[in-house]
């Protein structure tokens, strides 16, 4: 059974969604197998924090976990299992009638009681199938808007994966019952998400950023320019006297959080000269340099 997901990520039970996401990103980056090749301990730690984020990074799962409806592995808990069962009034483990047994799995429970864990089953109870793991490359837009992807395994099976809004790079999704078949039921599938680099957008902390090419005339006089966003092209107004490095904020066009709420997109202005030399522009610049020596703009 997994440890408490709050302990795994090192956050309090009152932590916000952003605090949970930041804690996961820090730990995932620290223990990712790509940065720790051959380090089995780091690989196992990465799996643990990914499984914890699978619970706490999903608002609905977190609510169920906090209410005791699912355990740290994401399995539904068994309440009142001990009363009136076929093994007597007290049920398994000597529990009192109606006693709640949190986080139990029937296959594991029977195996422990009958002393047959890993031994092929007894009395009709058998071990579940093996878990399977795979890596899935997704686009940045998929992580923002959510998506459905199909993934194929080496045994020829395919499964459909729902990418949640606000998915993180390195996040692992757990698909119950989608693993290898077994006499006690199938195992689970663990899908690690990898967000592909985007040619236009980049992530800087919790903010989505892009470069916005602007011509010299539009920067000096102001103007309208078209900009691409994850939701499609929009027209932006470039203020008169804009300079390189200044940013235009597009509200609600950025990254998604686990609740699907969108952040902002920052379009940073990049001044662009004509592709070919322009004699008139060069002559104007030469006169400007002589008549008005350059002074750095105060910040």
Image (cartoon, rainbow, N blue to C red):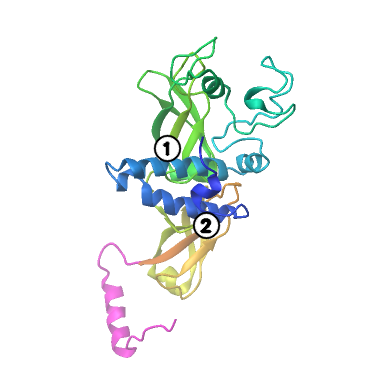
Quarter residue 57 falls in: top right
Residue 85 x/y as whole percent: 70, 17
Q: Residue furthest front?
A: 94
Query: At 73% from the left edge and 23% from the top edge, which residue is drawn?
Result: 83
- Which residue bears the numbered disc 2? 235
Q: Is residue 86 left or right of residue 291?
A: right
When the figure is inspected, residue 155 is found, relative to residue 176, above or below; the finding is above
**For the magenta stretch, what is the residue range?**
272-299
Residue 186 placement (x, y as % from top left): 49, 20
Q: Nearer the viewer, residue 68 or 153?
A: 68
Decide if residue 294 is on the left or right side of residue 142: left
Residue 84 falls in image quadrant: top right
Question: Contact, CB < 8 Å: mark 2 with mark 1?
Answer: no
- The verdict on residue 274 being magenta is yes
Residue sitting nearer the eye, 178 or 9: 9
Q: Which quarter of the rendering shows the C terminus? A: bottom left
- Label drawn at residue 200: none
Residue 257 highlighted magenta (yes or no):
no
Mark 2 or mark 1, which has the lower sequence index? 1
The answer, for residue 232, to whether it is visible in the render is no
Residue 73 locus on image (x, y percent): 54, 35
Query: Residue, x 30% and y 43% (percent of image)?
Result: 39
Q: Which residue is mark 1?
A: 192
Above/below status of 206 relative to 74: below
Residue 118 % position (x, y): 43, 20
């Amino acid at each position: 059974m997994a440890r408490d997901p709050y302990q795994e990520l090192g956050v309090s039970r009152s932590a916000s969604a952003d605090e949970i996401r930041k804690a996961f990103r820090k730990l995932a980056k620290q223990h990712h197998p790509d940065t720790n090749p051959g380090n089995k301990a780091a690989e196992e730690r990465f799996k643990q924090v990914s499984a914890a984020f699978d619970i706490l990074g999903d608002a609905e799962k977190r609510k169920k976990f906090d209410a005791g409806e699912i355990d740290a592995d994401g399995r539904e808990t068994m309440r009142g299992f001990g009363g009136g069962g076929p093994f007597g009034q007290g049920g398994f483990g000597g529990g009192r009638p109606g006693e709640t047994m949190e986080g139990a799995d029937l296959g594991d429970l029977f195996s422990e009681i009958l002393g047959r864990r890993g031994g092929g089953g007894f009395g009709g109870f058998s071990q579940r199938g093996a878990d399977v793991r795979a890596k899935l490359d997704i686009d940045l837009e998929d992580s923002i808007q959510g998506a459905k992807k199909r993934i194929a395994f080496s045994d020829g099976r395919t499964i459909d994966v729902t990418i949640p809004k606000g998915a993180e790079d390195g996040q692992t999704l757990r698909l119950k019952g989608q693993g290898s078949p077994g006499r006690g039921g199938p195992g689970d599938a663990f899908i690690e998400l990898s967000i592909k680099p985007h040619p236009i957008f980049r992530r800087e902390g919790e903010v989505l950023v892009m470069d916005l090419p602007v011509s010299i005339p539009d920067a000096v006089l102001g103007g309208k320019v078209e900009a691409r966003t994850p939701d499609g092209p929009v027209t932006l107004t470039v203020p008169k006297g804009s300079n390189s490095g200044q940013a235009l904020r597009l509200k609600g066009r950025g990254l998604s959080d686990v609740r699907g709420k969108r952040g902002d997109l920052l379009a940073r202005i990049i001044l662009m000269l004509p592709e070919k030399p322009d004699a008139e522009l060069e002559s104007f610049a030469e006169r400007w340099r002589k008549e008005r020596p350059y002074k750095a703009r105060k910040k």
